[in-house]
Image (spheres, rainbow, N blue to C red):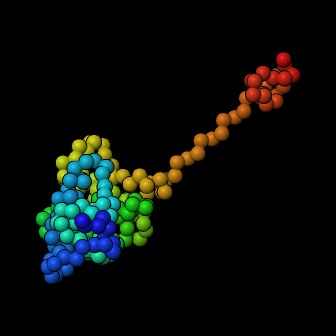
Amino acid sequence: MMPEVPGASDESVRDDATPFQQDIERWAQAAVPVLQEVAGTYGNFITYKDLANRVFKETETSTRMLIPNFSSRLLNRVIQICLEQELPALSSLVVNASDGTVGPGFDAVLRASGRDVPGTVLERERIAAAERLECYRRCGAEVPADAEPRLTPVFEARVNPPKKAEPKPKPVCAVHGIQLPATGICDDCA
């Protein structure tokens, strides 16, 4: 049985001596349809770990490489495939589970397409959100006509935390101007 996470100690050793570059190509070719499927639902995205697990399941091969190292190699090839096939930046759909960001590896998408690398995390995430919206549109998702790029919910909550409700003012006696007790009846008026 194949492990869920690359680098797992109980991973089966493959009998063949397939060069790693051929494996990356096979994994990337499997990743593109997975990412297109993800993009088929408006607002959808996938974590690095979930993408790795789906690709390993599709290809029936895995690696001992840790997810961050594997993902960067995989997505660098996916970026090239997207450019070659004139697909939207499907790698914008892959985010960190912990913070909902595409992370600095997404800068490779921008460099590959001749664009400037953003100076802040928020700028990068806004560019990735715009790319995700394009993925949804091009991959058949039902996108509202007025849809705008959206950050992932986890990152959005970090950037724009929900505002705490203002405390309700305590009721005051209209005659005496003092705060009313829990009964709602002024002790002096009763």
Check the image and report above or below for 138 versus 7: above
User: Can you see residue 83?
Assistant: no
Check the image and report above or below for 138 versus 22: above
Image label count: 0
Residue positioned 42% across, 66% down in the render: 121
**Quarter of the image where the N terminus is located:** bottom left
Residue 129 is situated, as x and y percent measured from the top left of the image, at 33, 57
Residue 153 is situated, as x and y percent measured from the top left of the image, at 41, 52
**Quarter of the image where the C terminus is located:** top right
Residue 39 shown left or right of residue 101 in the figure = left
Residue positioned 41% across, 71% down in the render: 119
User: Which residue is farthest top?
Assistant: 190
Residue positioned 49% across, 57% down in the render: 158
Residue 180 shown left or right of residue 5 in the figure = right
Residue 82 is situated, as x and y percent measured from the top left of the image, at 18, 65
Q: Quadrant of residue 7?
A: bottom left
Residue positioned 25% across, 67% down in the render: 2
Q: Quadrant of residue 48?
A: bottom left
User: Can you see residue 100?
Assistant: yes
